Image (spheres, rainbow, N blue to C red):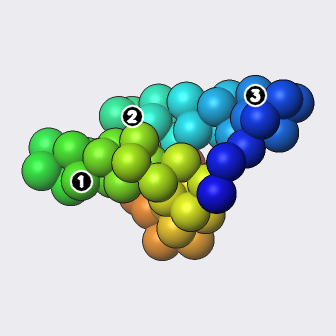
Amino acid sequence: MEVTGIGGLIVLVLDIWAIVSVLNSGTGTGNKVLWILLVLLLPLVGFIIWLIAGPRSASVR
């Protein structure tokens, strides 16, 4: 699946937001690496999976 144009820009912004949130979460380093790889390798699907099951940022607590 290829996302181009404004859709691609939106996916890029959402992926960057997901990666920053993973980095700010309180989870272990190994889990952070796995989540970031998932979001980078599968941008749209990885973001959706992160949104449903990913670690939450430390500021939520």
Residue at mark 2: 24
Residue at mark 1: 34
| Quarter of the image that includes the N terminus | bottom right
Q: Pick whichever of labels 1 and 3 is earlier in the sequence.
A: 3
Q: Residue 29, can we see it?
A: yes
For badge 2, the amino acid type reads Asn
**3 and 2 marks in contact (CB < 8 Å):** no
| Tag 1 secondary structure | helix
Residue at mark 3: 9
Going by the image, does 12 lie left or right of 4?
left
Q: Where does the image place residue 41, in percent across and percent down from the top left?
A: 39, 48
For badge 1, the amino acid type reads Leu
Quadrant of the rendered image containing residue 40: top left
Q: How crowded is mark 1: few (under 14 residues within 10 Å), some or many (20 or more)?
A: few
| Tag 3 secondary structure | helix
Q: Nearer the observer, disc 1 or disc 2?
A: 1
